[in-house]
Image: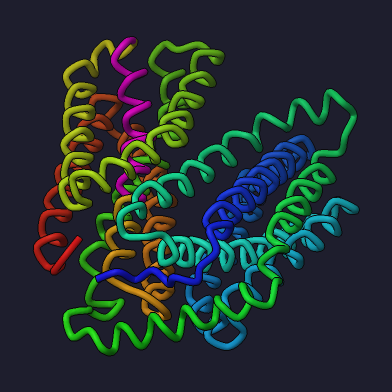
Amino acid sequence: MSLQTAATPRSVLWTIPIMFCLFLAGEFLALIHMGLTLADRGMSGFGIGLVSSALWGGILLACLKSAGWAARWGTAAVMVGAAGLATLIMAVTALHGWYPGWILGSFLIGLTNGAIWVLGESWLTQAASAERRGMMVGLFETSVGIGMLTGPLLLPLSLGAGMPPLGLAASLMGTGFLVLLPLTDRRIRDLGRAEIAAGNDLSARESATPSAAATTLPLILVAALAGLLESGSSALLPPVSTRIGFSLAEAATLGAVVGAGSALLQTPFGLLADRIGTGRTILLAWVILILATGFLALHAGAPDLALWPVAFAMGGVGGAVYTLIVIAIGHRLAGTELIKAMGWLIIAYALGSVSGPLIGGAIFDLAGFPALTLGFCAASLVGIASAMMALKRMVRV
């Protein structure tokens, strides 16, 4: 079943990833700068964490509301409006250092950026042809990884150049808003709403097409485990490595290796899904994660060399699992059902990302690095078992 709308301009497929990359670069630049600034002021770790938590709170709320907003105003109108509002909020945030204002600004940016994330990923997934959906979703997720890498790299550069980091963040988001402006073209603007209606009609006509809940629920745990492994490795492995003998420079480089995996492996896995099928590629990804985490567990006593390739695999392949789930959902759903499903997938991935560092850190504190590696192995085994059960319930992936 093809869910592509023939009238979809090819420009939409490229506009959304470029815009989202710019937005994430500005967002991560701002978050890191605010965190370091608050730490320099002597703010507690809890107080610093509230700024980041506010952002994720906004994203989670947007995941629940985006389908309704798109049905009422159209996908293009919501995305362009959210991008403009986010840019304005970041510009206002750059003008002051008031802590409560930073928390509010972080929440509102998360709310607007969450709407762009859900609707942009849904639109791109539906607009891409079934034969190229893996590649296009992979490119989108690659743009996400590049944005996450670029933001932190720009912070020292902006400070060295005497440029206010929050001002640069607002400029990046403003550029993303300008990139998105072609979606205000009347034909494209109306198309966003028409695609939702067409997708809803198609889902209603196809008796084999399950609802968002029926298709998404079996994959929620898989998405959460993917977030746990990808974000758990990026948040835990660099600081933990300093406790097992790595220098600060080596630990920082290890974090970059995790991020590089996240950025580089999404498109290849998407292309592989186009070639051999999404279900097979999801299972292959989990097999790689099992082998990688098992290899690390075997070398837990002296992980100096093993940690580098495993960190790359956990960041990249863990992220690829989420990418592949998006592709699978895109093959099955359209319209409002697709937007709802995408929202729940992002919520699951976010919850896994939040819980991964907490669970992994507790395991390390209680039982050390060998136990942490076994925890990674257990998560991978649960992941492949959950994926196999989920794929059996799906008619076609």
| Viewer-proximal residue among 213 and 360 | 213
Position of residue 253 measured from the top left corner of the image (x, y, whole percent): 51, 18
Q: Examine the image and state in which quarter residue 200 appears.
A: bottom left
For the stretch drawn in magenta, the main secondary structure is helix
90 lies left or right of 251: right
The residue at the point 60 percent across, 46 percent down is 21
Q: Residue shown at 29%/50% (left/top)?
A: 225
Seen at 67% across and 40% down, the residue is 32
The quadrant the C terminus occupies is bottom left
The answer to if 309 sits in the magenta stretch is yes
Residue 296 vs residue 100, the one in the foreground: 296
Determine whether 230 is above or below 102 in the image: above
Q: Residue at x 30, y 54 (%)?
A: 131
Quarter of the image with the N terminus is bottom left
Q: List x then y, in percent, for residue 334.
A: 36, 75
Magenta stretch: includes residue 152: no
The boundaries of the magenta stretch are 305-323
Above or below residue 252? Residue 211 is below
